[in-house]
Amino acid sequence: MWRYALPLAILAGLVGIFWHGLHVDPSRVPSPFIGKPAPQFSLSELRHPDETFSTSQLHGQIALVNFWGTWCVSCREEHPTLMQFAAHHDVPIYGVDYKDTRAAAVEWLGKRGDPYARVAFDPKSDAAINWGVYGAPETFLIDANGVIRHKYIGPLTPELIKNDLLPRIARLRAEN
């Protein structure tokens, strides 16, 4: 009897796990950094290699930090949305170009437009790793105290901005 019951119990458990997995949104991966200060970095600025851009420059304002690369197909999809956001909203977007070459990134922004207030150049992905980035694009909403309030995995869309990001920004402004 047990030799039949045990395999059936294991099979039932696996079916339950897989069934649950069908209903989980893969873009909603919780970040251990939510509610904590943004991890520190100090990197050269993409267009001005002799200038440094660091996390400390984010303090005092609500901002977005967008990790991207020229090699990223989804970043191409997201870019027009970032351009629209930058043109119509007063929340700065700071870029972190990672796993890339400086020349490719400068050319890419030159052709497509530049929605970023500044861009940090992270060719070895040191900052990306410290921020828990595992794919591109990933965007973080930072409050005026430099605390990560939300993380978006994948491309931002106009709907996501309207229905989720802008209400979050409004709440942060109301808190201050």
Image: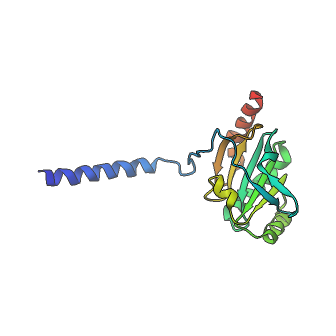
In this rendering, position of residue 7 left or right of residue 105: left
Name the colouring of the figure.
rainbow
In which quadrant of the rendered image does the C terminus lie? top right
Q: Who's the residue at 39% across and 52% down the image?
A: 18
Viewer-side residue, 36 vs 15: 36
Q: Who's the residue at 14% across and 51% down the image?
A: 2
Q: Who's the residue at 84% across and 54% down the image?
A: 118
> Percent from the top left, x then y, of residue 68?
71, 59
Total number of numbered discs in the rendering: 0
> Percent from the top left, x then y, of residue 142?
73, 42
> Percent from the top left, x then y, of residue 128?
67, 57
Q: Is residue 53 visible?
A: yes
In this rendering, position of residue 15 left or right of residue 64: left
Q: Who's the residue at 73% across and 68% down the image?
A: 100
In this rendering, position of residue 27 left or right of residue 62: left
Viewer-side residue, 161 vs 64: 64
In this rendering, position of residue 34 left or right of residue 82: left
Which corner quadrant of the image does residue 104 belong to? bottom right
Which residue of the protein is positioned furthest toward the top in this rendering?
A: 175
Q: Is residue 115 visible?
A: no
Which residue of the protein is positioned furthest toward the left in this rendering?
A: 1
> Percent from the top left, x then y, of residue 95?
77, 55
Viewer-side residue, 32 vs 1: 32
